[in-house]
Amino acid sequence: MSDNIRVYKRDDEGALHFREAWYDEEYGQFVMNFGAVGHQSKTQETDVPDAAAAEGLMDAFAAQCAEDGYAVIPEEEQSWVVAQFALKTREGTERDRRLQAKATDALVSHLAWRGLGTVERSEFTDSKLNIFCLCPDVNKAVAAIKVCARGEDLDFTKLSIGAAPFSDPENFKLKHSAKPANSFSL
């Protein structure tokens, strides 16, 4: 059984919508999450007796999504959006590692519940913490990352955000900087 299904569709006005489903073994629930990309989603949970029942619901969900015109957005049609926090030391301190965990967890949740993508990895490089997100909508992801950073009390004054096409990860463009800057580098 697929771990989860995440699909997208543009409406007649060009707005992107998403639907997502997964089986939560811990709670014995089939979960559907859906809404307009960039906005807090709606969630419906259905209690299921076992994984086989969840698989049947997952198959029905996939069929309904396909019938409604929803489809997976291939990675190569998405973009890398990197939330970058300036650090005081080259390798990062214990405090920076706590920031890494807190920021990564916050972004995983914030982006997922808005259909804005996934956090793929995080790393320390040359006095920077970089959190790599794969996103279907750059502008909405950048706005969401800024809201998340403020809301989670991450150091917004140290935040820069860059974006690049999936197929051109060397070509990041600056999308936000708390300090005056005109370029973005990893």
Image (cartoon, rainbow, N blue to C red):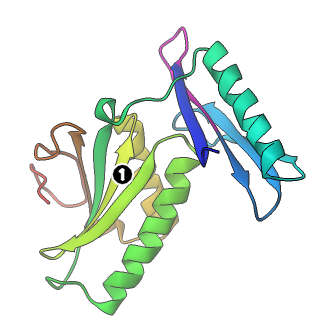
Query: Dividing the picture into quarters, in which one does residue 75 lie?
Result: top left
Q: What range of the chain is rendered magenta?
A: 10-20
Is 131 above or below relative to 10?
below
Residue shown at 23% from the left, 84% from the top: 92
Is 58 above or below relative to 92?
above
Q: Is residue 90 left or right of residue 133?
A: left
- Residue 108 at x, y percent in the picture: 49, 58
Circle 1 SS class: strand
Amino acid on which disc 1 is placed: Cys
Query: Dividing the picture into quarters, in which one does residue 90 lie?
Result: bottom left
Residue shown at 83% from the left, 43% from the top: 53
- Residue 172 at x, y percent in the picture: 15, 45
Give the labeled residue for mark 1: 133
The reply to whether residue 95 is visible in this rendering is yes
Q: Is residue 78 left or right of residue 64?
A: left
Residue 37 part of the magenta-drawn span: no
Q: Residue furthest bottom?
A: 94
Dot 1 surroundings within 10 Å: few (below 14), some, or many (20 or more)?
A: many
